[in-house]
Amino acid sequence: MIGLTARWRGRADPRRRNSRRSGVPPLNANVRHRIVSRNFAATCVSMDEDSDLWLVGFADAEFNTQRYLLLQRGKSLEAELGEDTVLGPDAYHVEVDDQSRSCYEGIKRFELFHDHAVVEFEDATLPVFGGEKVIVVEFALRQQQLDQLRACLAKIFKGYDCFLDRSA
């Protein structure tokens, strides 16, 4: 960037001149993070509930997965009854593509549609997810599967205001 700055010092930056003409605001040199948004088609959507946790997974393949999004939340008797005292962490866990890219909470918005989900992460989690701000996961589910997905996500995000069901 130093070479570019020195090269254009004292002259009008052509990027700014072109952007003014097109109505796009000039580039901001103070931007430190590049916001990344990716889409992937989930050919495998998994919902599971057992005695210990709720789990939802979206993956690009059933085996040899390259891209995936995993959401889970532990259960406790107190959490299910809605009592204040909870044993262990009562927060959802999110993982993207690798265990090293995971954290508790961190989703700003999870919008469920009938054929895709839009997941927007909080700014504080950008370093955890490699700068990924938004993931759009496309899928094809029968109505019964979509209903199960909706119900499981509602349990995972219970007590949080980030889950928006737009699948109806």
Image: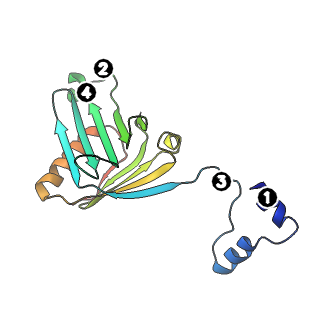
Marks 1 and 2, the one that precedes in the sequence: 1
Q: Which residue is labeled 4 in the image?
A: 79
Q: Check disc 1 and give the amino acid type.
A: Gly
Q: Is mark 1 on a helix, strand or loop?
A: helix
Locate residue 20, reporting x and y percent: 70, 76
Task: Measure how far apart labels 1 and 2 are at the Cα level.
Answer: 59 Å
Task: Measure how far apart labels 4 and 3 are at the Cα level.
Answer: 41 Å
Residue lying furthest left = 144
Q: Which residue is labeled 3 in the image?
A: 31
Marks 2 and 3, the one that precedes in the sequence: 3
Q: Check disc 2 and give the amino acid type.
A: Thr
- Contact (Cβ within 8 Å) of mark 2 with mark 4: no
Q: How crowded is mark 2: few (under 14 residues within 10 Å), some or many (20 or more)?
A: few
Q: Which residue is labeled 1 in the image?
A: 3
Q: Which residue is labeled 2 in the image?
A: 85
Left or right: residue 102 compared with residue 36: left
